Image (cartoon, rainbow, N blue to C red):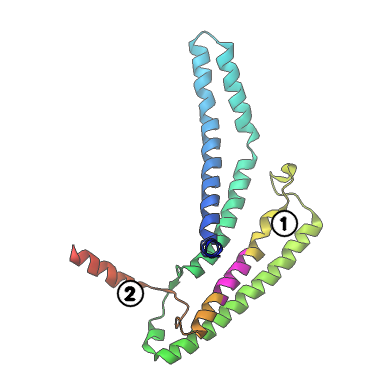
Amino acid sequence: MNALRRAWEHFEEGFIAFLLAAMTLITFVYVILNNFYTLFYWLGDHFGGNETLLGIGDAILDMAQAMTWSNALTKALFGWLIFFGLAYGVRTAGHIGVDALVKLAPRGIQRVIGVIACLCCLGYAGLIAVGSFDWVHTLFSAGIGAEDLGHYGIQQWHIGMIVPFGYAMVFIRFLEILVRILRNQQTGLGLADEAADALKVNEHEESK
């Protein structure tokens, strides 16, 4: 049970790490292939037109030209990264919040404002999740292949499904915040307090 809880609490981090690793690997391989074949051409010419080296250069060049899908896949993975990042920001209180006026209110009022704000965020996330689900369903019915990826069986709805899924995750994370507010475990959305962070950094620097 604890393992499942830890997996849920770090769900977004795992996917973000995977997406970043995949994007980096694809880009790295593409750049290497697009520059490495020239080395074998140079070596082949240097050794008097060595057919083996020139053949290796041709093979690498063919692989580089075949990776027309790399740019499209990287952009798709980046889109997925953005929507996982939304949920991650909500869960970790990483979104920037300017709530100085809210903090001036009494604690009870802060809690009321937090509930109202959380309900507004839940309504927005739910609305976008439902609307984007209808959009993805339309793409699914159309069966349109994704640009430069369609011949690999990847369709537009495969990429677009991250929108309803991402906002569903945002909805769940805000729902968790609402539960904590109602249980008096926090008073607001837990948004970042830039002033407090700046003071902590300043105190840390002065202590050195």
Q: Is 172 colored magenta in this rendering?
A: yes
Residue 137 falls left or right of residue 206: right
Q: CA distance from mark 2 to mark 1?
A: 42 Å
Q: Position of residue 27 (x, y in %)?
A: 53, 41
Label located before the other in sequence (2 or 1)? 1
Residue depicted at 51% across the width and 13% down the height: 45
Residue 175 falls left or right of residue 137: left
Q: Amino acid at mark 1?
A: Trp
Residue 33 falls left or right of residue 140: left
Residue depicted at 59% across the width and 51% down the height: 77
For the C terminus, the image quarter is bottom left
Q: Position of residue 108 (x, y in %)?
A: 44, 91
The residue wearing badge 1 is 157
Q: Which mark is residue 20?
A: none
The residue wearing badge 2 is 195
Magenta part mainly helix, strand or loop?
Answer: helix
Residue 162, picture quadrant? bottom right
| Crowd class of label 2 (few under 14; some 14 to 19; many from 20; radius 10 Å) | few
Tag 2 secondary structure: helix
Tell whether label 1 touches label 2 (CB within 8 Å).
no
Tag 1 secondary structure: helix
Q: Which residues are magenta?
A: 166-175
Q: Is residue 105 above or below residue 95?
A: below
Q: Is residue 43 above or below residue 125?
A: above
